[in-house]
Amino acid sequence: MTEPNSVKAVLEQLAEAEKQRAEPNLSSKQRRARTVSRLAAVQALYQMELAGEGVETVITEFSNFRFDADIEGEALAEADEAYFGDIVRGVIESQRDIDTAIKARLASNWRLERIDATLRALLRSGAWELIKHPETPREVVIDEYVELAKAFFDDSEARFVNAALDGVAKDTRK
């Protein structure tokens, strides 16, 4: 794992990647809000796993204290808070099915529990979107989570996220 980037650096990296693709039927501002929501969902799932906090507690914390606030001295771009809540609640509600879909794409000697908590959050969020939001192009979902992985990890982890989510998409989308 590489040294974590600043929130500003992560958002700049995601904004640059966003220029390469477009989520249909959404304006640039709406796509940016989705990107921020995805980043926040990964952070929330990570926080829930490490601190053992409940889903509604974490969603409320993000809504009240993290969105529309300065983080590391930088204003966080506007988030699609409803989509953020959908991702976090959806991952928790469907975690058994999501984990099964992810495990089917791991090497036989790998267990999901062995994977870094941030990577698990990335995979679970991405898998949830692939499974529950078929209207969002698979390329958009996979690219977003690969870019998030690049923001936190080395290229090998980003390739791992790409391969795992691509496999989940092949298994769940016809």
Image (tube, rainbow, N blue to C red):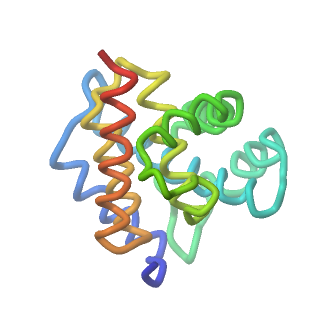
Q: Nearer the viewer, residue 14 or 50?
A: 50
Q: Give the x, y percent position of residue 50.
A: 75, 63
Q: Which quadrant of the view contains residue 66?
A: bottom right
Q: Is residue 106 above or below residue 5?
A: above
Q: Judge left or right: residue 21 versus residue 127.
A: left
**Residue 112 image point, x, y percent:** 58, 53
Q: Total of numbered circles in the picture?
A: 0
Q: Going 57% across and 55% down the picture, which residue do you hit? A: 111
In which quadrant of the rendered image does the C terminus lie? top left
Please say if 64 is above or below 157: above
Q: Quadrant of residue 52?
A: bottom right
Q: Position of residue 84 (x, y in %)?
A: 58, 38
Position of 39 relative to 8 (above/below): above
The extreme left residue here reads: 20
In the displayed structure, 23 sits above or below 142; it is: above
**In front: 28, or 166?**
166
Q: Name the residue furthest bottom.
A: 3
Q: Which residue is found at the position 77% from the left and 51% from the top?
A: 61
Image point (70%, 51%), residue name: 62
Residue beneath the point at 70% across and 45% down = 63
Give percent across and percent down for residue 6. Answer: 47, 76
Considering depth in this image, is 75 or 103 the residue closer to the camera? 103
